[in-house]
Image (cartoon, grey):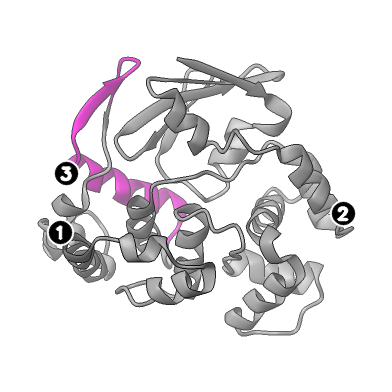
């Protein structure tokens, strides 16, 4: 199946390269992207962006294609914040993904105090060790492992995969989720979800915000990392040093739009717009 969409509001690179997903790789004229057990090929000719996949409904939701991002771009520009305006205009094709909840919990535990190439390598090794080998468009890939497989792997497996001190966090969290499930998390509002997520080993405030935003589609989340701290100081003239207070500051400014704004600011700063 092939899905086509206006490229102005769906840019494959901007969507995949802004830190919200770790399982993608260059392929032909675009990228292969992986979510859970599924894969797709996403590419653009400049006018249209195309998603080639076996499950159109899944990836239509994954790329949030039912949402009108022209309104989100105009909303962002309406704040009249120079960096935000430049980012929303230049990155109008950046879309927030609707990703698998459990995959995001484990992925962002791995992400803490880590860099993106290393995160991608660790996740790739975990998938190769515990996932199922599949093929899509002639390319072999490994699915993201089930929680049950992760729970049975043991901390030593995660250490060998390069997780470092995060090995115990992944082991304990996987065992807990395998026992309890995450149904209790799905019913919570954003604030309660963040607090509940921070009850898992290895999940601090920033990681909880990332999981809420990218896994549970809580768009009123605003993860604060070193890039956002830099933006807060340089572009907003802020003097706070506590990341929780910086998060509250941005939530106060942007409310239910916080997740979209965070991604425009974060990616725009990275691109030096």
Magenta-tinted stretch: 114-140
CA gap between label 2 and label 3 equals 47 Å
Q: Nearer the viewer, residue 204 or 119?
A: 204
In this rendering, is residue 26 above or below 28?
A: below
Does the magenta segment cover residue 136? yes
Q: Quadrant of residue 129?
A: top left
Q: Nearer the viewer, mark 2 or mark 3?
A: 2
The total of numbered circles placed on residues is 3
Of the residues under marks 2 and 3, which one precedes in the sequence?
Answer: 2
Of the residues under marks 1 and 2, which one precedes in the sequence?
Answer: 2
Position in image of residue 47 (x %, y %): 72, 18
Instruction: Residue under label 1, please give it.
Output: 151
CA gap between label 3 and label 1 equals 13 Å
Instruction: Residue under label 2, please give it.
Output: 78
Instruction: Residue under label 3, please give it.
Output: 129
Q: Secondary structure at mark 3?
A: helix
In this rendering, is residue 110 above or below 200?
A: above
x 61%, y 34%: residue? 66
Left or right: residue 219 compared with residue 58:
right
x 83%, y 46%: residue? 74
Left or right: residue 255 compared with residue 27:
right
Left or right: residue 68 compared with residue 65:
right
Q: Nearer the viewer, residue 213 or 164?
A: 213
Position in image of residue 56 (x %, y %): 45, 23
């Amino acid at each position: 199946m092939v899905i086509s969409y206006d490229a102005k509001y769906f840019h494959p690179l901007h969507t995949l390269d802004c830190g919200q997903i770790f399982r993608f790789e260059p392929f032909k004229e675009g990228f292969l992207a992986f979510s859970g057990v599924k894969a797709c090929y996403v590419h653009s000719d400049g006018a249209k962006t195309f998603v080639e996949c076996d499950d159109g409904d899944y990836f239509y939701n994954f790329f949030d294609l039912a949402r009108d991002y022209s309104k989100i771009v105009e909303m962002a520009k309406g704040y009249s914040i120079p960096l935000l305006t430049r980012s929303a205009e230049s990155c109008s094709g950046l879309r927030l993904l609707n990703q698998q909840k459990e995959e995001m919990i484990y992925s962002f535990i791995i992400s803490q105090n880590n860099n993106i190439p290393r995160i991608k390598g660790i996740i790739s090794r975990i998938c190769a060790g515990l996932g199922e080998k599949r093929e899509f468009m002639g390319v072999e890939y490994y699915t993201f492992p089930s929680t049950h497989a992760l729970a049975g792997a043991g901390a030593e497996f995660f250490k060998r995969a390069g997780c470092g001190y995060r090995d115990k966090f992944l082991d304990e969290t996987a065992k807990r989720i395998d026992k309890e499930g995450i149904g209790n998390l799905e019913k919570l509002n954003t604030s309660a979800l963040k607090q509940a997520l921070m009850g898992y080993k290895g999940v601090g405030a920033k990681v909880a915000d990332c999981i809420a935003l990218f896994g549970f589609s809580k768009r009123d989340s605003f993860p604060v990392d070193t890039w956002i701290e830099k933006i807060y100081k340089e572009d907003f003239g802020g003097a706070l040093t506590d990341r929780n207070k910086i998060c509250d500051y941005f939530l106060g400014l942007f409310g239910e739009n916080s997740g979209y704004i965070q991604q425009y600011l974060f990616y725009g700063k990275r691109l030096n717009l």
